[in-house]
Amino acid sequence: MSSTHFSSQNGAGGPPYANGPSQNPVALQPPGPGYMAHQTPYNPMQGKGPMPPGPGLYNSGPYQPIPPVSSNQALPVQPMLNRPPMGHPHSMTPPQSASPGPGSRMPPAHATPPPVSANNYQHAPAPAWQYGGTPPMGAPPSMGAPPPMAMPPFRPVGNHMTSSPSLATPQASLAEYSAAPPVFHNATQPLGPPTTLQGYTQQGSAPLPMNPMAAPHSYQPGMRAPYGGPPPSVRPTPPTTGPPMGNANPPLGPKTDGHMPTPGNGAQVPNSFDHLEMGPTMAGPVPPQQPGPPTRHMGLSYPSLPPGYQNTSAPPNTATMHHPMQPSTQPYSHAPQPYQQPSAGPAQLSPSLAGLSLQSQTPESLRVVNLLQERNLLPPGPVTPPTPCLPQDLQKINCHPEVFRSTLTSIPQTQSLLNKAKLPLGLLLHPFKDLSQLPVVTSSTIVRCRSCRTYINPFVSFLDQRRWKCNLCYRVNDVPEEFMYNPVSRSYGEPHKRPEVQNATIEFIAPSEYMLRPPQPAVYLFVLDVSHNAVETGYLDVVCQSLLENINALPGDSRTKIGFITFDSTIHFYNLQEGLSQPQMLIVSDIDDIFLPTPDSLLVNLNECKELVQDLLKSLPQMFGKTMETQCALGPALQAAFKLLSATGGRVSIFQTQLPSLGVGALKSREDPNQRASAKDIQHLSPATDFYKKLALDCSGQQVAVDLFLLSSQYCDLASLGCISRYSAGSVYYYPSYHQQHNPAGVECFQKDLKRYLTRKIGFEAVMRIRCSKGLSIHTFHGNFFVRSTDLLSLPNVNPDAGFAVQMSIEENLVDMQSVSFQAALLYTSSKGERRIRVHTMCLPVVNSLSDIFAGADVQAITGLLASMAVDRSVTASLSDARDAMTNASIDSLTSFRTSVLTIQQPGLLAPACLRLFPLYILALLKQKAFRTGTSTRLDDRVFAMCQLKYQPLAYVMLMIHPALYRVDDLTDEGSLNVSERIVPQPRVQQLSVEKLSRDGAFLMDAGSVIYLWIGRNCNPNFLTQVLGVPDYAAVPPNMNMLPELDTAESQRTRAFVGWLREQRPFFPILHVIRDESPLKASFLQNMVEDRTESALSYYEFLLHVQQQVSK
Amino acid sequence: MEAAVFVLSLVDCCALIFLAVYFVITLSDLECDYINARACCSKLNRWVVPELVGQALSTVLMLVSLHWFVFLLNLPVAAWNMYRVWKVPMGNMGVFDPTEIHNRGQLKSHMKESMIKLGFHLLCFFIYLYSMILALIND
C-alpha cells in the first residue's frame, strides 16, 4: 500500500495539505499600532477593496516596452485588402508618417504614434502591484482614501429614528414601505433565466417567479427610481384575521396579494413586514400547491426532500415565521425582551438539548453498514446533507447547505481528534448562488464586531439589550443606537429581532465606506479569435447571434460599456464611437508592442452606441470569411484587452480555437496522443509558462476577470491557458471538437451556455472574506480567484455559478465552546452600480468524541473537497500520487471508524451509514475523467475536468463524479412532483452498473453537463413510439439530441422529467439518445463506475481492497 | 592568505544574515497582511539567486582553502538552495509564487526555512570569526 496520503488524513503529514500550518491568526486580531503605520484602515472588507486603477497608477510592467522608433516604422499596417470594407480600416500611422491617410476620420489625437500613447501608461513605474492593501501613498488623490480605522463604525442615531413617528400613520402598505428609511425589503434576486436554481423556494410553489424583472431594489423613494419600475416585490399586508404569518391560511394567492391594499392599521404593520421579509414563499404559501409527501412542512429547515438540490421547502429565514418570539396575534410591544431570544449564541446553547438531539440522531447516521453485504446503498432520491445537531431554533436559521456546507457538521474539539478521524475538514461555498429570495438591508451603519469585523448574525449572543458578543472572536460589542430600533416591528429595544439577526444569509447595501472608488459600471469586452481555424468552426455566427439576441439582457445600467477585439496574427480593434456611420476597424500588426489605437472609443456605452454594436455583430461573421491567416496571437490580444479595461475593470470573454502560436504567450503542443492510454504518469498538467498567470494577476489587480471559451478540436494546452481565468476569477468553458456542421450537439450546448453566460447575474470588483471562530484557521483555498491575504479572496468578477472550497485546521483547542461559526462575506458591485455585501453565516456544534464526528460527516462534501485536494496533488506531485491519496482517504477513515468507534468487531467492511457511499464516491473519482488512468483521455479533457472539480459548486460536481441513473421507460405519476403545473415523475436512482440496465428498458443517465438516454435493444415498443416517435429500435436516428414533442402521456412525462433535471442547473446539459451502436456508448459506459474496466477495479473489488487494508 | 579567505567569508556571511533577516521580515509582513502576496513574492524572488550565489561562494571559498569541515557544513545548504530553484515548476513565478504562498501552509514552511537559515548563518558567522582570529594570530 502506498503511503501517500493527504496529510489532513494522516495527521502531521508532510508539508502539502498539512493540516496545521498557521495561517495568520493576526488577521483576526485587532490591528496593532504598527499596523496603522503601514496601511490606513484595517477594515477587512473595505480596506482591501479594489483600488481604482487611475491611469497614473498603471504600471505597464514588462508588457509595454517603449518601442524603438524604428520598430514603429514597421508598424503601419497592411491595408486590409481582402476584407470587406467596414468604415475604413485604419492602420495606425507611424510617427514619421506625415499625415494620416486620406479619408481617415480619426481625430489627430487618436492617431498619436505608439510611443506617445504608450506614454500615457508609463508614468508610474514604481508600484508594481496596486492593491487596496498597499500604503495609501499609492492611491490616486482623486479617490477618497479609505476611511481610517478609527472612524466610528457606528454612527449615532440613524435617520430613520427621526422619521419613525410618521411611520405609524396608517397608510397603504406600499406607500408605507417606501416611506420607511431603513429599508428592509424582500428583494427578489434577479431571477435570471428560467433555469435559475431555485435555492430557497419550494419547487412547487407558484409564487417563485413572481416578479422576474425585479432586480433587488430597495424602496427608498427617489433612490432606486432610476433602476426599477414599481417595486414589485413589496408584499403588502394581507388583511390579518388569523395569525398573520401562519402559512396555513394565507388569505390570498401570492400573485394577488401583491396588489392587496392593506387596511391601514398600526397593529398590522409588523405583520406586513413579516411578509416583506419572508418573501414570496411566505407571502403565499398555498398548501394545495405544496408538492410532495405531507411530511414536509414549512418549519423544517432542510427537510430531506427527494427531488434535486434546490428543493428545500423553507428558506432559512422562514424560521422567523415559527419564531416563538413573534407572537403572531399580539401587537408588538416595545418592551425589550432580550432574554427570550431563541437565537441565542453559543453561550446559551443548552448542552443537554444538544446532547438530546444528538442521541436522537446518532442511530441512523452511525448505524453500522457492512458494505460488502449491503449492495444497494443509494437512496432512492438525491443524497441529502446531514443536519448539524444544533438546538432546533438555531438550526432553523442556519445557512442553507447549498450555499455553505462543511465536510464535518460536527467540528472536532482538537486537531488531534480531527487527525484521528482521518476526515478532511473544510467548507464548500456557493456564495453568489442565484437565490429566489434574499433579505436585503439598507442601513446607514452595518453592525460589525469591532475587533474581528464580523457582521452581526443570528448566532451572536445579546448579553443584554445594549451589548452583543461576537460569535467569532467573543468580544463584547455595543449595540449601536440605530440598531436598537427595529424597523420590522417599528419598535425600539429589540435588536435581536432585526433581520440581520434573523437571517443567516442576508445582503446589505453598502454605504460609501465600502467603496474605494465610485462603483464601476458593467464593462464587457469580447475578444474573438478570427483565424482560419476559428472561422472554419463557424463559432462566430453563434457568438454574434447570441449577443444580438441578448444585448438588452446583458446585466447593467445606463453606464454599461462594451467593446470588441478580434485577433489572428494581428489585433483588430473596433471603433464604435457615437456618431460614426459604421464601425471602424483598426488593425495593429505590431504584436510585440501592443498599444491602443484610439483608447477612448474602443469601449463604448452600450446604450448610446447600440446600433453600431449591432451593425458590427451582424457583419462580423462575414468579415473574415475568406481569411487565410492561420496564426493566432492570443497573448498580445490579452494584453490589449487588459490595457483597454485596466482603467475601469470589467469582464473579458475570450473565444479561442487553437493553440496560441504568435507573440508572447505562444505555446507548443506538449501532448503525445500515443501516450494517452499507456503513459504511466500523466505529464503536463501544470502550465508551460507563467505568462498567463502573471497577466491574470495583473488583471486581478485592476479588477478585470477573464473568461475563456475554448472551442477546439486539437490540443490547446488548457493547463496553461486556463491560468488566465483561474487567477482572475473567471470561468472556463471547453467545447471539444466544436464544429458548426459536424457537431450540432456541441453547437446547441455552446448556444445555451452562452445565453446563460451573457444574461446571468454578475458582481464586479468583488472580494470575499471567510472568517471563522477563534481557534480555526483556513490553510488552503480551492477555486478560481487570487488569495490576496490569509483569508481574503480577490474576485474581479463573481458569478452565480462559481463554487469555492477551503480546507481548515484547528489551531487552538475548542474546549470551552459549544459551537463555532463561519462567515463568508462577499463585497461586490452589482451590475446596477450598487455596492453590496452578501453575508452567509453558518453555525456548527463542537464535539469531543470520534463517534460524534463520524455521525456528522457529510459524504458529498468530503468527496468534493477530496476531489479538489486531489487536483492540487496531481499538479504539484503526480496523478498516481493523487489517486493513492484518495484511496487512502477512504481506507484511513474506515480504519479509524473500525478501531475507534466500533465496540463490537464484526467481519466485513464496516462503515457508518453516513459514510456508506464514501468508497463508492472515491471509486467514482478514480474513474472520473480527471483522474482515470489506462483509458485514452485527452489532456485538455482531463485538465478541464480538473478545473470543473475545483470551481463548480458541489451539487454539479457530485453529478460529474457520480451520475444519476434512472429507468425511464416505465415512468409513472407515483410520487411525482408538481412543478409549476407540470407533473414531474420521480423515478428511483439506480446503481451505476451495467447489471441494472436491461435490454427491454430505456435508461436516463444524468451526468451533470450531459444527459444520456440509453435505449435497450428490446425496448418496450410503446416507449419508442410514444416517446421517441420512431416505429422501432432500428429507426432511432444515430444523432438524436432531443425528444420530440408528442402528445402522449409518456412523452409528456419523459420531457417533464428531462426538463426538470435541466432546470436544476444553470448550464444546459445536452441530451444524447444512444443505442448499442452509437459511438457515444463508450462514454455512457465509462460512467458505469461500479463495473470493472480493463484498467480499473469494480466496486466490489475495490471494497475488497479497502477491506484488506482496513483490517490490516 | 587564510585570514583573507575568512574575512571574505565573514563579509559574505554578514550579507547572508541580512538576507535571511530580510526574508523573515518580509514573510512575516505577509503573514500579518501588511503587504500583499504579489509584492512580497516579487521582493523575495529577486533575492533568491543572490542568496544562492552567496552561499555557493562561501562553500567554494571553504573548498579552495581546504577547510573540509566548514565546507561540508555549507554544502547541504548550498545544494538545497540550488535544488529549490531547480524544482520551480515552469508555470510558477519563482520560488515564491503569489498564487500558492497562501496554500497548503507554504507560508509557514518558507518562514521555517528562513529561520533555520538565519540560525545556520549565525553559526557560520561565529565559526568564520573564530577561524579568522585564529588565522590572524597564527600569522
Image (spheres, rainbow, N blue to C red):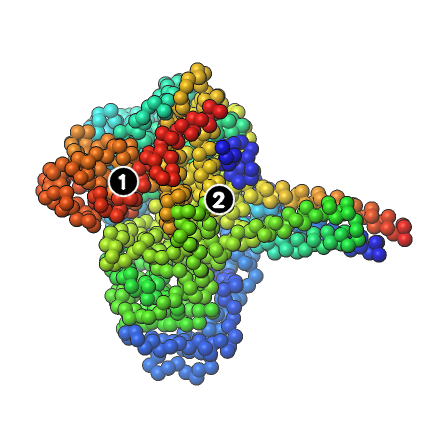
Give the image location of residue A521, x and y in percent. Answer: 37, 57
Q: Chain of mark 1?
A: A
Judge left or right: residue A1033 versus residue A461. left
- Dot 1 falls on a residue whose secondary structure is strand
Judge left or right: residue A39 versus residue A1104. right
- Dot 2 falls on a residue whose secondary structure is loop
Judge left or right: residue A282 versus residue B88. left
The residue located at (34%, 57%) in the rendering is A712
Residue under label 2, please give it. Answer: A878
Give the image location of residue A259, x and y in percent. Answer: 19, 41
Residue under label 1, please give it. Answer: A1006
Give the mark, 2 or 1, whose residue is nearer the N terminus.
Answer: 2
Tag nearer the camera, 2 or 1: 2
Give the image location of residue A26, x and y in percent. Answer: 56, 40
Report if residue B136 is visible in the image. yes
The residue located at (53%, 31%) in the rendering is A11
The quarter of the displayed image where residue A257 is located: top left
The residue located at (43%, 52%) in the rendering is A719
Report if residue A840 is visible in the image. no
Decide: marks 2, 1 in contact (CB < 8 A)?
no
Q: Amino acid at mark 2?
A: Ser
Give the image location of residue A461, x and y in percent. Answer: 45, 29
Comparing A294 with A224, the one in front is A294
Crowd tier of the residue under label 2, counting other residues whose Cα lies within 10 Å: few below 14, some 14–19, many 20 or above = some
Q: Chain of mark 2?
A: A
**Image position of A950 with respect to A462: above or below:** below
Residue A163: assigned label: none
Mark 2 to mark 1: distance in Å?
30 Å
**Image position of A340 with respect to A382: above or below:** above
Q: Amino acid at mark 1?
A: Asp
